[in-house]
Image (spheres, rainbow, N blue to C red):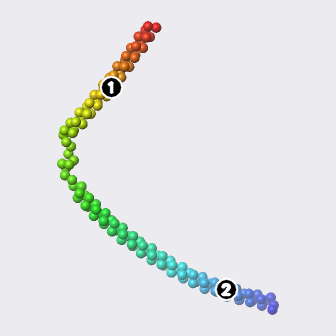
Amino acid sequence: MSSVNKFELLHTKVLQQNTQLRSEIKCKDTQIDKLKIALIEYDKQMREKVLVENEYIISQLETENAHLRKLLLIPDELFKEDPEELKKQEAIKKKQMLKSIDEKLKQAEKKIAKKQTAAEIYQQN
């Protein structure tokens, strides 16, 4: 066999492999297209399912919200403060204020006494 025949034979084998590979590629492309369609359909179904579930949850929450709003209509009498309790709180505030004023006066007297003793010691020297 001559080298030309060998190359022709090799060429025909390569062409056969090429056509076989192309057919395999077409097969894989169709499989990929089918998978893409399946994924798109699955995604669509899942989105619809999630949408339906979310709408159901929202309707439940709205119902619960309406019930809670009805429950929150508590009589105003429960929120009124007892006048005796208010008087007690005011008296406690006044006592605390007087105590703080008393403490401030005592501190001021101590400072004045310290200054006077310091002035006396200075005059003696």
Between 93 and 29, the one lying in front of the other is: 93
Counting from the top left corner in percent of width and height, residue 102 is at 30, 25
Q: Nearer the viewer, mark 1 or mark 2?
A: 1
In percent of the image, x 74 and y 89: which residue is there?
9
Q: In the orientation shown, which residue stands out farthest toward the top?
A: 124
**In the image, is 20 to the left or to the right of 37?**
right
Q: Secondary structure at mark 2?
A: helix
User: Residue 61 occupies which quadrant of the picture?
Assistant: bottom left
Q: Residues within 10 Å of mark 2 (few under 14, many from 20)?
A: few
Q: Check residue 115 in the rendering and tell me which mark sits there, or answer none.
A: none
- The local secondary structure at tag 1 comes to helix
In the rendering, which numbered label is found on residue 103? 1
Name the kind of residue labelled 1 in the image: Glu
The residue drawn where x is 66% and y is 85% is 18
**Mark 1 or mark 2: whose residue is earlier in sequence:** 2
* Apparent side of residue 35 relative to residue 72 in the rendered image (left or right): right
Who's the residue at 37% across and 17% down the image? 112
Instruction: Say the numbered circle drawn on residue 17.
Output: 2
Front-most of residues 87 and 39? 87
Please, is residue 17 above or below residue 40 in the view? Answer: below
For the residue marked with disc 2, what is the amino acid?
Gln
- Against 54, residue 21 (above or below) is below
Separation (CA) of disc 1 from disc 2: 105 Å
In the drawing, does residue 69 fall left or right of residue 30? left
Q: Dividing the image into 4 quarters, which one contains the N terminus?
A: bottom right
Left/right of residue 111 with respect to residue 94 in the rendered view: right
